Image (cartoon, grey):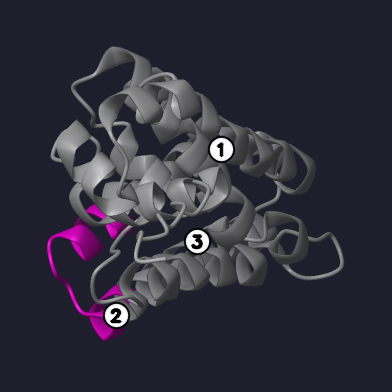
Amino acid sequence: MNAKIRQRRPAFDRDQGIALAQALFHQRGFDAVSLSDLTGAMDIKPPSFYAAYGSKAALFEKAMLRYASEKALPLDKLLTRDRPPADALTDLLVNAALQYGGDRTMRGCMITEGMRADDSVARNTAEKLGDVGIQTIRRYLVEVCPENAHTLADYLQITLRGLSAAACSGMSVEQLKEAAEFAGKMISREFEAREANPNS
């Protein structure tokens, strides 16, 4: 028989699609990734995309959850009560610097940068996910430094977001690490000052 046997197209892998979307969103940001970018990377048509994920914003949430499960800073291991708080917090910042600047193409924190999205659904989702980490840090600080927990938490949040933004702007991982270490020294001085003047 000369009839050509038609080859069946491989089944679409939704999890692989999420991985591809995660890379695109991380590299470019939510707003800069179009539907055609996503369907092109996945080699599917728009109807199949909507059937699989519902919307671009819904896929963004799945991609951020995947990012959080793989790339989230290990707060439970870094912020432990068996070590000096200043050391733990410095390690947190240094780990963030190394992670945010360690990849040439996927820079910064995907969730932090997602908070800048123009799309309100995507932005709110990123804010909720980001808040989980910040609240973990706040709870830790309330335990180890209740007098100044909220100010320190704000300082850490600002520093982490600044490291992410600087990484996205192209700052080298060495510079990011040095900045994180310097911020850690400021935190250490704060704890030292409180130990020297416990009633202040």
Give the left or right position of residue 103, taking residue 28 as reference.
Answer: right
Q: Which mark is residue 187?
A: 3
Q: Main secondary structure of the magenta part?
A: helix
Disc 1 target residue: 134
Residue under the point 12% across and 61% down:
169
Q: Secondary structure at mark 3?
A: helix
Q: Does the magenta run of residues contain 167?
A: yes
Please tell me how crowded label 2 is: few (under 14), some (14-19), or many (20+) other residues with Cα within 10 Å.
Answer: many
Quadrant of the rendering where the N terminus is positioned = bottom left
- Label 2 sits on what residue type? Val
* Proximity of marks 2 and 1: CB atoms separated by less than 8 Å: no
Asked whether residue 138 appears in the rendered view, the answer is yes
- Of mark 3 and mark 1, the one earlier in the sequence is 1
Real-space Cα separation, disc 2 to disc 1, in angstroms: 23 Å
- Residues rendered magenta in the picture: 163-176
Is the residue marked by circle 3 packed among few (<14), some (14-19), or many (20+) residues within 10 Å?
Answer: many
List x then y, in percent, for residue 103: 33, 75
C-alpha gap between disc 2 and disc 3:
21 Å
Left or right: residue 124 compared with residue 14: left
Quarter where residue 174 is shown: bottom left
Q: Position of residue 83 (x, y in %)?
A: 79, 70
Residue at mark 2: 173
Q: Residue 164, image x and y in percent?
A: 30, 56
Whether 94 is among the magenta residues is no
Residue at the farthest front position: 1
Q: Is residue 197 above or below residue 174?
A: above
